[in-house]
Amino acid sequence: MEHQLINGIEAALGWKGVDELGKGFVRGSMDHPALVSRILTPNRLLDIAMRRSLSRPQFRCFQKGDEVHPAVYYTDTVSPRGQSISMVNMRSLGRLLGEGATLILDQANVFDPTMEVACRALQWWSHERVQVNAYLTTNDASGFPLHWDDHDVLIIQLAGEKEWEVRGTSRTAPMYRDSDPNNTPPEEIVWAGVMKTGDVMHIPRGHWHQATRNGHGSGNSLHVTFGITQRTGASWMAWLADWSREHEVFRHDLDRVHGTNTKALATAAAQLIGERSPADFLAAYEQATTLPRHVPFLDVLGPLDTVVCTAHFPPQIQENGEAVEVVASGKKLTFTPKAVPALRLLLSGKPVPVEQAAAVFGAEVAEVAEILMEEEICATLTPELSSGYTGLVTNAVS
């Protein structure tokens, strides 16, 4: 899937693919105003807050460095039937923003189709899970204090400007669950400056950083942070622990009284490591990922028009002579070789107008599309989901 945002990020950071992810701090700028405003705007973020029943900690507000109690800007809306739904009180939220505050929406990709498609594209690009958080700061409000993240981040300044300070690491490759709390930031400042609209920054895992608008007066800042959690050796070991249950020696109780056969355990562990490599783990992780959310296709609502692959990671198309296997989202589907052109088109990650594609590639496109839809590897391109692709991902037939 070729997404304009990924092209812009690579160009801004001087990257040629995903290999530099996590390797070092770098920043640059996207000279593409239309692309920046297409991703998200302050008003669109506020519209999401107004129309959704968001709750803490997914949606939070900070003022003067402290989190504002939700009761200040939430209201229980009661329906005529007496049903109570917690909704953001936009008047109260507006007052906070007028005084100067920071709004944070975690996992904006759950609520906004443009963010959803951007995260999916980044997942296909990085082969790792991605989520995006949005941060809107007004006037001279401060942000989070100096901290580090347990994942790599790509930060894009979408509106206004914000001052940043980025420091080095105080522990090599720190983790969320770790043997060291890693609470002391280093003195070394890697970069300090102002991020302006269109600027892009990559902060690798463990680098300390903070952002603020203190001293910048009136105005606003909107940036999104794409969090990319890469798998580690510890992830592989945890995966191996699950596979150990296949071996009887690991299922026996550890004997406190007579002692456990440590040698047998060590031999079995070495065998398990030899059988299932880190590469096996990386492949299995992608192929076994559960199905994503999507709007189901119902023919009673109208004919199938356009479909798109919504798998979290690129499906694997494996040609084995007399058969073709598609592995994706925990499923393995078998097709005849003549389906290969249709499969490559439908699993490209790009929207596919079925009738138009069938005219170019043959009637198999419609047949294969129906199967992939039924297996939930592809989804119908609703007008709402289509808005996440328009101008960002080209039509597959084009």
Image (cartoon, helix red, strand yellow):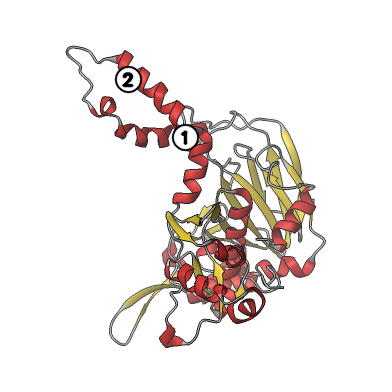
Q: Residue at x 63, y 32 (%)?
A: 169
Q: Residue at x 67, y 53 (%)?
A: 155
On the rendered image, what quadrant is the N terminus found in?
Answer: bottom right
Mark 2 or mark 1: which comes first in sequence?
Answer: 1
On the rendered image, what quadrant is the C terminus found in?
Answer: bottom right
Q: Residue furthest front?
A: 322
The answer to whether residue 377 is above or below residue 258 is below
Left or right: residue 292 versus residue 28 is: left
Q: Distance between the Cα atoms at labels 2 and 1?
A: 18 Å
Q: Residue furthest right?
A: 31
Q: Quadrant of residue 230?
A: top right
Disc 2 is placed on an element classified as helix
- The spot of residue 181 in percent (x, y) is 49, 31
Disc 1 is placed on an element classified as helix
Disc nearest the viewer among 2 and 1:
2
- The spot of residue 390 in percent (x, y) is 67, 74
Q: Amino acid at mark 1?
A: Trp
The answer to whether residue 65 is above or below residue 353 is above
- Residue tagged by mark 1? 236
For label 2, the crowd category at 10 Å Cα-Cα, with few meaning under 14, some 14 to 19 and many 20 or more, is: some
The answer to whether residue 80 is above or below residue 178 is below
Taking depth in this image into account, of 263 and 336 the one nearest to the observer is: 336
Taking depth in this image into account, of 36 and 55 the one nearest to the observer is: 36
User: Residue 311: in sight, yes or no?
Assistant: yes
Q: Amino acid at mark 2?
A: Leu
- Residue tagged by mark 2? 265
